[in-house]
Image: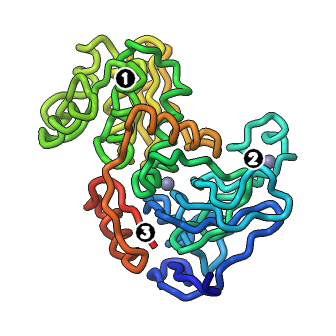
Amino acid sequence: MSETMRAVEVPEAGADFEVVEREVPTPGPEAVRIAVEACGVCHSDEMTKEGVYPRIEFPRTPGHEVVGRIDAVGADVTEWAEGDRVGVGWHGGHCFTCEACRRGDFINCEHADVTGIDFDGGYAEYTVAPREALAAVPEELDATEAAPLLCAGITTFNALRNSDARPGNLVAVQGVGGLGHLGIQYAHEAGFEVVALSRGTEKEAYARELGADHYVDTEREDPAEALQALGGAKVVLATAPSSEAISSVVGGLGVDGEVLAVGIPADPVDVHVGQLVGTRGSVSGWASGTARDSQDTLEFSALRDVTPEVETFDLADAGEAYERMLNADVRFRAVLTP
Ligand SMILES: [Zn+2]
Ligand SMILES: [Zn+2]
């Protein structure tokens, strides 16, 4: 194996990506090294690029949708072996000893590490990750299709499966983009009656192909009225990072309904509390999950053939992939391959 590798670095907050030649990292006793097969480009990589995440240090390699094969194992790691196919998502490890960890709530660990922020992520030929941050990746999944499941996939899958929605319930997915096109597939496979909400008519046929039973063009119809006409939603999975979009669906909730936000708008959301009191409704948020949740997502996706639409870019074109992702000019997830 060569001593050096190609990696994409953010040299300092706000700077452009640089493709550098760097020493191949060596895993510590509790970590593994992964030969990267693919890494997704996510909107949250902006936190690395712009340096807005607390405690980030530069230079830093982004990337928290990593798929690859273990090629070196730390001395104390017994549950993973060289050759294992693994993925790493946003949750990049936990301390096992804080209050949240003692309760098994690893995602809320007070000292949780974030992949591509607290340590170098997957925009590279090799990356090193802690043992507890690894998910096994089924062999039947293509690396470029598995990568986005480590963030966009787990976020929508895990939000839906932890909601109160049951088979047959009306579940709306707002936004037919990177997260939404996966959310519709998961909602359909989970047995919900699925409503896709999006602006315009151009995504209607596609949303129905993914498994939507209904489509609401929010430019022509008020989404709250449309959802009430269908009986009221048990869950609205809000994937579009728009505060107006989230406000516009609160009135569409049925009894005990929930607007579950997974996209994060920059502005606060206006909610008429009367609409919540009348239905025992709520507006809540959900953040991805742990490595085992990632593995559940990957296994379910393989079982039910849930696949993201991806465009692939060479590692050297990370800048272009990132720009196109920011401009919502990618259908629907950009993925880097080394
Ligand atoms: Zn992400
Ligand atoms: Zn902890």
Give the Cα distance between marks 1 and 2. Answer: 30 Å
Answer whether residue 215 is visible to the viewer in this image: yes
The disc label shown at residue 171, or none: 1
- Which three-letter amino acid code belongs to the residue tagged 1? Val
Please report contact status of discs 2 and 3: CB closer than 8 Å, yes or no. no
Dot 3: element: strand
Quick check: 254 left or right of 290? left
Residue 12 location, x and y as percent? Answer: 56, 82
> In the displayed structure, would residue 62 be above or below residue 141?
below
Q: Quadrant of residue 250?
A: top left
Q: CA distance from mark 3 to mark 1?
A: 35 Å
State the separation of the CA atoms marked 2 and 3: 31 Å
Of residues 18 and 73, the one nearer the viewer is: 73
Q: Is residue 326 left or right of residue 197?
A: right
Which mark is first along the chain, 3 or 2? Answer: 2
Query: Quick one: label 3 or label 1, which is nearer the N terminus?
Result: 1
Q: Residue at x 62, y 70 (%)?
A: 120
Q: Residue at x 45, y 38 (%)?
A: 302
Helix, strand or loop at label 1? It is strand
Residue under pointer 3: 337
* Apparent side of residue 307 relative to residue 61 in the rendered image (left or right): left
Residue at left offset 38%, top offset 69%: 322
- Please tell me which residue lies in front, 121 or 269: 121
Residue at the spot of label 2: 109
Amino acid type, residue under disc 2 in the picture: Cys
Up-down relation of residue 175 to residue 213 (above or below): below
Q: Secondary structure at mark 2?
A: loop
Residue in view at x 80 percent, y 42 percent: 101
Q: Position of residue 194 (x, y in %)?
A: 31, 24
Q: What mark, if any, has residue 40 been given in the picture?
A: none
**Where the N terminus falls, by quadrant?**
bottom right
As rendered, which of 159 and 270 lies closer to the eye? 159
